[in-house]
Every structure is written in C-alpha cells, then in structure tokens.
C-alpha cells in the first residue's frame, strides 16, 4: 500500500482515498501500525465518540502515552473532557457569531480595499499570495491582537505544526531547523503585555481574571488561535478560489446570488478538506465492523476521504453550489469541531463578496502548484486571470 504521507498521495490523494474506503470500515496500515478510516459513516462515528476515541494522547501519529510531544499539548485539540471543557467554553464565547458582529463591517471594508489594490496591479496574479494568504494575514492577527513585528512567522509555524501531526518524514525534517525560533516567537505573542486590549487574546486573559480558566492556561489558549487560525483559513480560501476558477458557471452563480458565499466556502471545505487527516487513540479495545482496534492504538481518520464518500455524497467530486454541504467533517465533528469556524466563514464571506462585486470572471492562467504538507491540502501557487469591471 502507498504511504498516505508520501509525495505521490499528497499530490493527489483521490485514488488512495478510494482504496481506503473500499478496503473496509477500518483497515490496518502496517507501515505505521495504525487503523485507517475513510468512510463517512465511520469517520463521523469516531469523531463523535470522544470517550472511545480520545484526543488526549495526541491527534497526530505520535502517541503521547509513549512519546514526549514536541510542544506542550494544546489544551483544546489534544485534551479530553473534563480538562478540555473550560478552555473550549471560553473560546466558543470569544469566537462565537455574536462576538464577531463587531468585526464584520471592518472585514468587509478590508476585503474591498485588498481586492481593489490587487486588481489595480493587473488582471493576472497568484490568488494564493495575493488574496488567500494576504486577507487572513491582514485581518486575523489584528483580531487576536498581536504586534505587527514577526507576523511572517505565522504561516511557517503553522506549516510545521501541521506537518508534525504526520510521521517524521522529509517534510518534518525540512521544518526542524526553524522550530525553536518559530515556537519562541509564537509563545512570546501569547503574553498578556504584548496583546492589544481589545482582541481575542485580551479576552482570553480576561476570562482567566474571571476564573473561567487559570492564568497558566491563558497563554496556551492564545497559542491555539495562532496555531489553528492562519494556515487553515489560507488554504480554505485557496480551495474555494480554486473551485470557482475551475468549475464552469459557479462564479456566475455566486455573482447572481452573493448570499451563496458562505455555503460556497463550506462546500469548498467539504470538497478539498484543507485539514485532510487527524488521529485519535483507542481508549479500550473497540470493535469497528468486524475489526478490533486494540486499546492504545492510533486511528487515522481521512476527513478528505469521508467528505467525498459516494455512500454519503451524490457526485462527491463535484464542487456543487446546489448541494447542502452541512454535515461534512472538514471542520471535524463532535466536541472538538472547529471552534474558529465562524471566524473562517466570515473571512470567506468578506473576501468572496468583495471579489464578486468587482470581478465578472475568474479562470486559471497557468499550472497550479500544490504545496505538500502531512496534514493540509494546500496550494503553493494558483495563477489566475480575472475580468474586472
Ligand atoms: C491548537 C491547534 C493546533 C492545530 C490545529 C488545531 C485544527 C488546533 O493548538 O489548539 O485545530
């Protein structure tokens, strides 16, 4: 069997995903001694069963029962109830739809300004750097409240973090030389005195003052925002822009009905699954179909395969604005489901709305280049040509 973290699969995982789904509800991968799932039904069930499939032993290949984590574990992602719950409750409130209302107008204006400046430079550009990366980097660090200096470290830190959920392959080795420097910078941004008084970061510290979490937990919760909040949205936005550039009629459909921006983003998260995989650990011997997953073994969940499982999705490989993508597992499912999803959707809505107001057509203008990462489905470059009005 192919290596799920090898370059061949990372370049185009579709065939491998089909093989995993067809092999059964769960299949043992000898190379890593893990149990893999690719069918929607079983991935969904594993994500929802947090008692049987724990996160506290890590959600990457590394098993924290036996191996020391490369960084202090996340209080959200790599924790189980009850310890998971207080930090989760705090972030749910700070990143909730109500709390985001005050950002909406500003982000719509920011998106318009960014799109105007990109279009002013000409009709051909790389939509990854010009928009998919530029927009989150423009609005999200300000919303968290970190200083301007060093923000170029955010994407490399995230890229390494998401590689580190996989095996110690060439991708992890390539990131290793900068780990200490990048981690030191990220950790320094989590301190109370460097954060602006009105951002998500300050609100996390205020929650500590209020007794909702401890002051020791506050910087690690800020770290979760800086870890999970940048690369994911960059590649989610790249996915939706790629979908529009390659799906006939889709852009015209959005232009006719701009309110589709949010469902378009969710459909792109289903279709591309920017976060492709996460692991869980069996807390006891668990029977899945006819296979026993032994206590302590890692379960590799292919979110990207589940999101294109033909058992669940008609014509799954089609980016389809007429389908209801809700229920996809691209944001996870259950108690760990992406706490920042409303932030991501607001970023997507702002950017797509601004672009749809000014651009009547978007097409590929050259060969797109994939960016390989052990966890992320990403683009290095997406050359496009647009027709501006
Ligand atoms: C965290 C974290 C890091 C990476 C991903 C993630 C997708 C969370 O540090 O909490 O969720």
Image (cartoon, grey):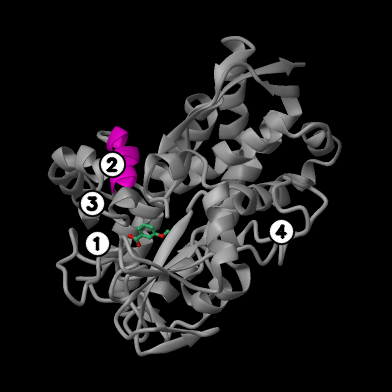
Q: Nearer the viewer, mark 4 or mark 1?
A: 4
Q: Residue 359 location in percent, x, y?
A: 73, 23
Find residue 219 and name its label: 1
**Over which residues does the magenta segment extend?**
151-160
Cα separation between marks 2 and 1? 28 Å
Dot 4 or dot 1: first in sequence order is 1
Q: Which residue is mark 3?
A: 168
Q: Main secondary structure of the magenta part?
A: helix
Q: Give yes or no for contact between labels 3 and 2 (Cβ–Cβ under 8 Å).
A: no
Q: Secondary structure at mark 4?
A: loop
Q: Is residue 315 visible?
A: yes
Mark 1 lies on a secondary structure that is helix
Mark-to-mark CA distance, 4 and 1: 35 Å
In the image, residue 224 above or below residue 163: below
State the mark number for residue 325.
4
- Residue 132 position in % (x across, y down): 52, 34
Left or right: 70, with 54 as reference point:
left
Mark toward the start of the polypeptide (1 vs 3): 3
Label 2 sits on residue: 171
Circle 1: is it few (<14), some (14-19), or many (20+) Cα within 10 Å? some
Give the number of the mark in front: 2 or 4: 2
Q: Quadrant of the C terminus?
A: top right
- Vertically, is 237 above or below 59? above
User: Along the line of sight, which residue is nearer the eye, 67 or 144?
Assistant: 67
In this rendering, position of residue 215 left or right of residue 388: left
- 165 and 94: which one is in front? 165
Secondary structure of the residue carrying tag 3 is loop
């Amino acid at each position: 069997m192919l290596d799920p973290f090898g370059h061949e699969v990372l370049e185009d995982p579709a065939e491998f995903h089909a093989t995993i789904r067809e092999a059964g509800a769960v299949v043992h991968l000898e190379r890593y001694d893990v149990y893999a799932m690719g069918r929607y039904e079983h991935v969904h069930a594993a994500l929802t069963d947090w008692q049987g499939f724990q996160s506290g032993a890590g959600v990457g290949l590394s098993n924290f029962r036996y191996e020391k984590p490369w960084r202090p574990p996340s209080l959200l992602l790599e924790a189980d109830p009850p310890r998971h719950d207080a930090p989760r409750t705090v972030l749910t409130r700070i990143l909730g739809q109500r709390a985001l209302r005050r950002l909406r107008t500003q982000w719509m204006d920011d998106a318009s300004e960014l799109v105007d400046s990109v279009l002013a430079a000409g009709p051909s550009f790389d939509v990854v750097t010009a928009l998919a990366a530029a927009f989150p980097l423009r609005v999200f660090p300000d919303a968290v409240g970190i200083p301007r200096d060093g923000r170029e470290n955010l994407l490399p830190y995230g890229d390494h973090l998401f590689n580190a959920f996989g095996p110690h392959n060439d991708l992890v080795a390539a990131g290793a030389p900068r780990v200490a420097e990048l981690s030191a910078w990220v950790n320094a941004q989590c301190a109370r005195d460097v954060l602006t008084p009105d951002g998500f970061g300050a609100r996390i510290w205020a929650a500590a003052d209020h007794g909702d979490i401890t002051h020791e937990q506050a910087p690690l919760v800020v770290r979760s925002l800086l870890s999970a909040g940048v690369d994911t949205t960059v590649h989610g936005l790249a996915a939706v822009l790629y979908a529009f550039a390659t799906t006939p009629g889709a852009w015209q459909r959005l232009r006719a009905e701009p309110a589709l921006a949010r469902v378009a983003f969710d459909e792109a998260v289903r279709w591309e699954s920017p976060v492709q995989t996460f692991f869980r650990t069996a807390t006891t011997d668990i029977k899945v179909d006819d296979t026993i997953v032994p206590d302590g073994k890692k379960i590799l969940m292919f979110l990207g395969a589940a999101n294109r499982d033909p058992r669940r999705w008609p014509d799954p490989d089609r980016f389809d604005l007429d389908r209801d993508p809700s229920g996809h597992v691209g944001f996870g499912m259950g108690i760990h489901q992406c706490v920042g999803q409303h932030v991501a959707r607001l970023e997507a809505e702002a950017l797509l709305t601004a672009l749809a107001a000014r651009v009547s057509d978007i097409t590929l203008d050259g060969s797109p280049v994939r960016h390989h990462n052990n966890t992320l489905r990403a683009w290095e470059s997406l050359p496009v040509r647009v027709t501006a009005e």
